[in-house]
Image (cartoon, rainbow, N blue to C red):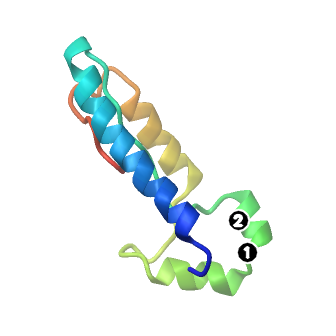
Amino acid sequence: MPGGAPYTAAKAGLHGLTRTRAKELAPVGSLANVVMPGLTLTERAKGAIPGEVLDGEAARTPTGRLTAPKEVAALVVFLGSAANGHVNGENV
């Protein structure tokens, strides 16, 4: 991705920060994770990105489709809930 260095550096920084915070906060019972779903099929994406580009991106995923916003939301809810007692320091 031309000009993508700042974006890539920010993503790497988030991953490192998450791993560090997970280790620092675990002793007090706090978990730290980061959710980076990539291209998500939001209304904004559907309006801003040509359909053939969305289709091409979907074809490159293992599932053959883009992630729905409700799937990202469900993951975030799980990670922040009492149901998550152990997932910590992960980049999802």
User: Which amino acid type is shown beneath numbered disc 1?
Assistant: Ile
As drawn, 18 above or below 83 = below
Specify the farthest residue to the right. Answer: 47
**Contact (Cβ within 8 Å) of mark 2 with mark 1:** yes
As drawn, 36 above or below 59 = above
In the image, 20: left or right of 11? left
Identify the disc placed on residue 49: 1
Q: Pick whichever, 36 or 50, lies toward us.
A: 36
As drawn, 59 above or below 88 = below
Residue indicated by mark 2: 45
- The residue that appears at 70% across and 81% down in the rendered structure is 51
- The residue that appears at 43% across and 46% down in the rendered structure is 14
Residue 48 lies in quadrant: bottom right
User: Which amino acid type is shown beneath numbered disc 2?
Assistant: Ala
Does the rendering let one see residue 70?
A: yes
As drawn, 48 above or below 50 = above
